[in-house]
């Protein structure tokens, strides 16, 4: 169990204990009650905003023990302007990657999604609408969005994705229930370039990503801007990242290859 989840359970039990004491013995002093409420809220918000903590959902942040290679992942596409450039660079380097596509963009550009799959890359889901308030939505809203995105990708590629990365990396208990019901694997990252920001530079993206390139790393990049209003700096930084991988003899692998390998290792003899 992730440490953050254990802390959440412990904090929840502590909150229940304070309530029980107030009801059965005497009211808890207001200062203590306020401090406990603020602390609990801060803990929950950390779980919402920091996917890597795994507070509400199990998150794959790196490859399994002994994993070889680096998993490059690309969010917010496909983009008719930038995705073909990324695909060409990956082809030149002989690298396979994982593309977390937005359902509505996939629906608008199905030929790009088919091209991603045809070149041997994994197509995964980054929600249908990429709602920045996704973690605050109801379970019904989340399920409707995810099912729509999954259906779109399945219609285009013939395969239903099993991998999901939440919009802006935020999660919630309601999302966790839906994700579990849909049997999706949540993919995080061990290195990221923050290249989705409009002010990011290729030099800055490469400087943040390259130190984290090692066996088992999962790298978060973008092949499109969320609103398609600028060129992601990660596209221009990609040649440097691929060159660094080559220099370190790191192959590029799909995330699902690691999950399939782990499933085989966990299978009974």
Image (cartoon, rainbow, N blue to C red):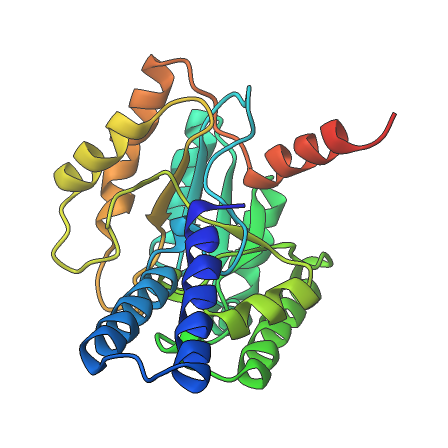
Quadrant of residue 153 in the image?
bottom right
x and y percent of residue 47 in the render? 38, 61
> Of residues 50 and 246, which is closer to you in this image?
50
Using the rendered image of the protein, determine whether residue 130 is visible from the camera's viewpoint.
no
> Of residues 190 and 248, which is closer to you in this image?
190
Instruction: State which quarter of the image contains the C terminus.
Output: top right
Quadrant of residue 217 in the image?
top left
Please state if 196 lies on the left or on the right of 255 as rendered: left
At x 74%, y 32%, the residue is 266
> Of residues 93 and 262, which is closer to you in this image?
262
Residue projecting furthest to the front: 25
x and y percent of residue 12 in the render? 45, 67
x and y percent of residue 75 in the render? 40, 55
At x 59%, y 85%, the residue is 140
Instruction: State which quarter of the image contains the N terminus.
Output: top right
Decide: is 164 above or below 121. Answer: below
At x 21%, y 62%, the residue is 230
Q: How many marks?
A: 0
x and y percent of residue 76 in the render? 39, 61
At x 63%, y 58%, the residue is 184
Decide: is 118 above or below 261. Answer: below
Quadrant of residue 28 in the image?
bottom left
Please state if 119 lies on the left or on the right of 70 as rendered: right
Please state if 184 lies on the left or on the right of 61 as rendered: right
Using the rendered image of the protein, determine whether residue 86 is visible from the camera's viewpoint.
yes
């Amino acid at each position: 169990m992730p440490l953050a989840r254990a802390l959440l359970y412990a904090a929840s039990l502590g909150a229940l204990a304070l309530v029980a004491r107030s009801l059965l013995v005497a009211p808890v002093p207001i200062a203590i009650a306020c401090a406990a409420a603020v602390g609990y809220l801060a803990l929950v918000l950390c779980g919402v905003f920091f996917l890597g903590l795994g507070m509400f959902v199990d998150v794959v942040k790196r490859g399994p023990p002994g994993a070889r290679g680096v998993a490059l992942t690309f969010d917010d596409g496909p983009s008719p302007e930038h995705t073909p450039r990324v695909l060409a660079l990956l082809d030149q380097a002989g690298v396979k990657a994982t593309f977390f596509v937005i359902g509505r963009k996939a629906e608008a550009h199905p030929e790009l999604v088919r091209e991603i799959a045809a070149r041997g890359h994994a197509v995964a889901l980054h929600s249908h609408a990429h709602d920045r308030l996704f973690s605050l939505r109801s379970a019904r809203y989340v399920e409707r969005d995810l099912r729509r995105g999954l259906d779109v990708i399945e219609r285009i590629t013939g395969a239903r994705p099993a991998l999901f990365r939440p919009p802006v990396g935020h999660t919630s208990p309601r999302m966790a229930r839906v994700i579990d019901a849909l049997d999706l694997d949540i993919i995080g990252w061990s290195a990221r370039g923050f290249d989705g920001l409009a002010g990011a530079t290729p030099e800055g993206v490469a400087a943040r990503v390259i130190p984290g390139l090692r066996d088992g790393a999962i790298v978060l990049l973008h092949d499109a801007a969320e609103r398609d209003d600028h060129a992601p700096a990660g596209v221009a930084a990609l040649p440097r990242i691929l060159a660094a991988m080559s220099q370190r003899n790191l192959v590029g692998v799909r995330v699902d290859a690691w999950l399939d390998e782990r499933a085989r290792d966990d299978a009974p003899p």
